Amino acid sequence: MAILPLPLTYYDEAGIIKPPVWLYLLLLANSVDWLITTFAVVSMQHTTVLLGIFYPHSSLLWVKLVASVPFILALLLIGNRERLWKKSWRRWVGVLRLLCWVGIIASGTLLMQQLWLSHWAFHWWLAIQLVTLLLFSALLARSQHLRLMLADWRKAS
């Protein structure tokens, strides 16, 4: 009898390791720029006011949207994994971790630039973003669940 490396609740019905919940939460938290932009555009009357609260310079919005594209791509790949497996596409699994690291580096660079331009003044919004980026990078580097999941997905059919 084989011993499972993770508790049974971490497996789906097919016996494949499910992504950790923290991965979804941190990918969504770090792609919050897309959510803010979507909500601002949906409320047509207050679009400029809402975007002005979070992005004082309009160029900052576009740069942050581009920097968070790797997080959106990672979410899309994870969400469509079964569809991709049915087409026998498995190479994307190796790119998943790289996408997360590229997003962390790009977002972290922009965050440091924002802090530098504000003369390192404390802002809650920037502090929350910094904490989520640091937490995401620590979990991405050290998570055994994520390592086992990626190894399982490479051989999944």
Image (cartoon, rainbow, N blue to C red):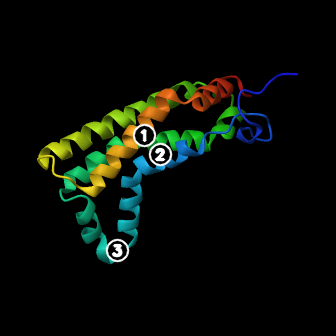
Kindly identify which numbered label has been placed on residue 26. Answer: 2
Q: Earlier in the sequence, mark 2 or mark 1?
A: 2
Are there few (<14), some (14-19), or many (20+) residues within 10 Å of tag 1?
some
Which sits in the foreground, 28 or 137?
A: 137
Three-letter residue code for mark 3? Met
Judge from the rendering whether residue 102 lies leftward or rightward of residue 21; answer left or right: left
Residues at badges 2 and 1 in contact (C-beta under 8 Å)?
yes
Three-letter residue code for mark 1? Leu
- The quadrant where residue 77 appears: top right
Q: Which residue is mark 1?
A: 135
Q: Nearer the viewer, mark 1 or mark 3?
A: 1
Q: Is residue 48 above or below residue 69?
A: below
Residues at marks 3 and 2, CA–CA distance in whole angstroms: 28 Å
State the image coordinates of residue 62 (x, y, percent, origin top left).
27, 50
Q: Earlier in the sequence, mark 1 or mark 3?
A: 3
Residue at 30% in and 38% down: 108
Which sits in the foreground, 139 or 26?
A: 139
Are there few (<14), some (14-19), or many (20+) residues within 10 Å of tag 2?
some
Are there few (<14), some (14-19), or many (20+) residues within 10 Å of tag 3?
few
Q: Return the residue found at the far bottom.
A: 45
State the image coordinates of residue 53 (x, y, percent, origin top left).
25, 65
Q: Quadrant of the C terminus?
A: top right
